[in-house]
Amino acid sequence: MNNGLALFLGVAGVFAFSWGAFILPAHWQLGRLGQYRDPVDETLHPSAAPGLAAQGGEVYADLGCVYCHTQQVRQTTLTRLKEGKRAAFNPDFERKWAGDANQPRPSYARDYIQDRRVFLGQVRLGPDLRNVGTRFPDDQALYKLLFEPQAVTKDSLMPPHAFLFETRPIVGERSAKALAVPAPPGCEVVPTPRAEALAAYLLNLKDTYDYPEERRRNMLPSAAILEGDR
Amino acid sequence: MTETPPSQRAEQAGIDASTKVPVAVLLVCALLWLVSGSALQILASIQAHSPAFLSNCEWFTFGRVYPAAQNALIYGWGFNAAFAVSLWLMARLSCAALRHGGWLVAAAVFWNVGVKLGMLGILTGASTSVALLEMPRFAVLLLLVAYSMVAVWGVANFSQRNTGHAYASQWYLLGAAFWFPWLYILAQGMLFVAPARGVMQAIVGEWYVQGLYGLFFIPVALSSAYYFVPKILGQPIRHYFLAPAGFWWLVTVLPLLGGSRLVGAPVPVWVPTTGVAAGFLLLVGLLAVGLNLFGTVAGSFDRVRASTTLSFVVAGVAFFLLWGVLQCATALRSVAAHLPLTLAREGQDWLLFYGVFSMAMFGAIYFLLPRLLLRAWPSAMLVWTHWVAAALGVLMVAGVLILGGWRQGELLNNPAVPFTEVAQAVSAWLAARSVGLMLLAIGHIAFLLNLGWMLCAGRAANAGGLIPPPAELPLAKEPRWQESQT
């Protein structure tokens, strides 16, 4: 351990190992994932986000929504007693975070290949947003939430993002985009372009297409865990 | 105890003096970041349970203040302190004066301007929202230039060493000097220059975060521990033959833990599995380091308590062992079901960055500044306040986040509890975190006051003897590591 060169080579070796053991195989494995062509209607999945939604992703990054919200529906890993029998369940499914309510599924790596930025997130201070597009009917409901979450849910812990909106005097007709929120007389509250992009991004978040291959592969581990838990 | 011969002591004083200007500049910057970073932490923490607080101002929305606070602590306080302590320690251990140290002041200026620009970028909306890599690109370039200057000086000093051997602290410092830039460049490249596709981005991100802790902050912290424990106790490291094995084992295993941050995520299953397995392998490395450091300390705890430096450094080593044990506990199946995507992760990271790294740095700074400036710390009371606030504060912050995270996970996993109720339950724990952060801030203010007082008081006041110069000032016997090695 006294030879500087040997020490340096060891140091480089440690780094190369951490890279080679972790990043390289993952890159090799995930790099092969491509879009999936539906055998029936020949559509490609997942599809790229439309332009406005892609811009909204930048707004999502710049406002740091990721520090409170995740974007990943987790795999089935829990069991509970139901009618005297142990049954697997996925809390994310029951919270309606998993896309199609009739056919809920966890997130797959393939779901993300078209995302310019991936926001898996680290902590769920707010609900998971991977399928938020299935829960909101239109941008108006999102605007209302972003403008003042406390008006939607009492004591909500989501911070208001009123700065994404503009209060301006009504000139001529009321804007079609104006929010249904209290505004000073003669004024209206309208979303800025950033708010519109963000809403488009959120509405576009929905993984409703199910990949047959992934579904089969992902069902296996949960069954294995069931066995182990008995 | 034999005294170091006066000639050798004079030489050491010369080496210390050669590091004086850059190290003092870096440390003052580090302390200012520490105080401003903890103010930002408190602000973000309050916003997390009182969302209306400063929410009208876009610059200070939670999603920007939180990453800004993290960056101020890691890149502002963490790196400045690590630079200062590493340069000083390397020069001492290599018995070589730091030549042309003035250039390092330029590096310090670059680094701190880089961090400030990066923070400004985050607050004004250029954040990338990738954990610990939020700073926009223009800041990254400055940071890399500044870092390479510091690292070149450190490595050059090592290669000009006037000793035949390289001590454990030097292995850790040399490793850290190279690992950080490699990690940083690869992560920046794979995330922003030629972005990897899909969840590969998340894997690279977690690899970077874990690498930053495991291959930079932990090694720097351990290098201080390996220096100060034998130095101040005047005893060589026990079982020193284990030190090389401990070193290689730890630095190989620590970065692999990144996988454990992705449990349940839509990534290949082997990624989290490797991370969890690494958690168990970690125990072997912890055992080696524990036998070395606690083996040396054993039986001398009263002397640890009597030394300011050692009470910080040894607390840091204890937090390291605690963190390692928690890391294994979280791999157990019943725990692993609840903890992912909760506050617990942040709690563990606090234990690592603050409990281990920052405590070790505090200890080192209490030792080295008086020797560089030839002044004593004016107030023992403020030192004591700092220690108590730091130790209790980090236990509280990490404890609250880990226990709160456990509760949060339990509630999230029970779909019968509506989400609003989960959020309300979590907010009580977040309020407790704010209290813990305030406790930490009290310690930081005490530290800053003591430093300011020391700088203003000048030598005259010390002659009056507010407190006697630290007992270690006549240097304790050099630890005889060669002896224990053979």
Image (cartoon, coloured by chain):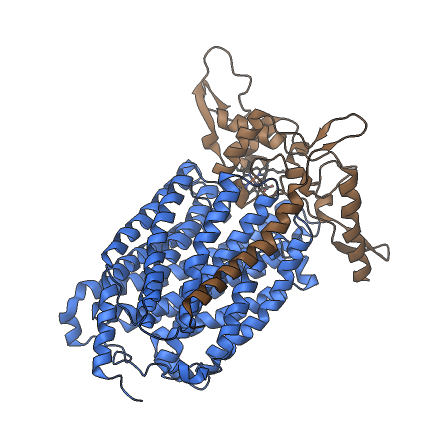
Chain colours: A brown, B blue
What residue occupies the far top of the structure in this picture?
A172
Residue B302 higher or lower than B110, as above or below: below
Question: Could you tell whether B12 is left or right of B111 in the image?
Answer: left
User: Which residue is drawn at the image coordinates 60% and 39% (left, top)?
Assistant: B197
Residue B83, percent across and down?
35, 59
Name the foreground residue: A82 vs B402: B402
Residue B74 in view (yes/no): yes
Name the foreground residue: B158 vs A145: B158
Residue A193 higher or lower than B234, as above or below: above
What residue occupies the far right of the structure in this picture?
A84
Residue B389, percent across and down?
39, 66
User: Which residue is drawn at the image coordinates 54% and 43% (left, top)?
Assistant: A66
User: Which residue is drawn at the image coordinates 70% and 52% (left, top)?
Assistant: B414
Q: Quadrant of residue B227?
A: bottom left
Q: Quadrant of residue B284?
A: bottom right
Report the number of discs.
0
Residue B107, percent across and down?
30, 52
Name the foreground residue: B426 vs B209: B209
